[in-house]
Image (spheres, rainbow, N blue to C red):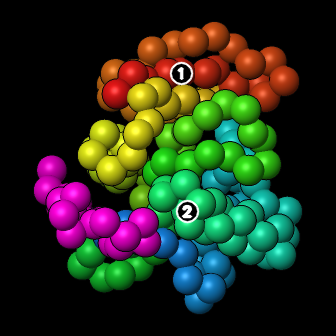
Amino acid sequence: MQTTSPKTAHHPAAPHYTERLELCGVRLADIPDLYAFLGDRTAMRFTHCDESFAACRKRVLVHEWFRRRDGFAPWVVRLRKTGRIIGWGGLYTDPFDPGWGPELGYYLAPAAWGQGFGRELAMAALEHARDMTPIKELTAFAHPENVASRKLLLGLGFEPAGFVAAMNRDRFTFRL
């Protein structure tokens, strides 16, 4: 996988490229496309669903503030060929549920499911964590019924770390 090298990606908002994806910080103009799936109860049935456009906008913009603070936050995921937004994810520290440390998360539009984009995004995020941050361990969460996410995390080398009843999620950890 070819992503942007540390020498050219010194700025936290600098785009990262994988074979099929462009990963970049959020622009206000991106929020309607993000809300199309982040606010879709069916698409987000195993994770957080934004109840309104305003809630989505707030969540995304707070994460962007954290990018300036921490040097990382979820990326907008675009197809390189078309520029179409298909997801949001990567590394982040959750400002709305703090205490878990740096996390890996990925949220994809249903049209992008099952095509390996989650893995491509996650691998770029792990590379970014290793090369561009002081992060030593990541956490990730997956709903027990989200077989695809569980399989992805285990395939990347995440280790099961128990069930978090308050979240109704399995917790996974990864040592960098």
Residue 49 makes an appearance in the image: yes
Q: Which residues are magenta?
A: 1-20
Left/right placement of residue 15 relative to residue 92 reads left
Residue indicated by mark 1: 172
Q: In the orientation shown, which residue stands out farthest toward the left?
A: 2
Q: In the picture shown, does residue 13 fall above or below 141?
A: below
Figure quadrant of residue 97? top right
Q: In the picture shown, does residue 87 fall above or below 106?
A: below
Residue 66 image offset from top left, x and y in percent? 62, 60
Residue 83 image offset from top left, x and y in percent? 35, 81
Q: Mark 1 or mark 2: which comes first in sequence?
A: 2
Q: In the picture shown, does residue 1 fall above or below 46?
A: below
Left/right placement of residue 12 relative to residue 26 reads left
The answer for how far apart the CA atoms under marks 1 and 2 are is: 23 Å
Residue 114 makes an appearance in the image: no
Q: Residue at x 45, y 15 (%)?
A: 159
Between 130 and 84, the residue placed more toward the observer is 130
- Magenta stretch: dominant SS? loop
Between 36 and 25, the residue placed more toward the observer is 25
- The amino acid type found where label 2 is placed reads Arg
Residue 96 image offset from top left, x and y in percent? 79, 48
Q: Secondary structure at mark 2?
A: helix
- Marks 2 and 1: in contact by CB < 8 Å? no
Q: In the picture shown, does residue 120 fall above or below 160?
A: below
Q: Secondary structure at mark 1?
A: strand
Label at residue 67: 2
Between 47 and 22, the residue placed more toward the observer is 22
Q: Residue at x 49, y 31 (%)?
A: 138
- The amino acid type found where label 1 is placed reads Phe
Q: Nearer the viewer, mark 1 or mark 2?
A: 2
Q: Is residue 27 magenta?
A: no
Circle 1 crowding by C-alpha within 10 Å: few under 14, some 14–19, many from 20? many
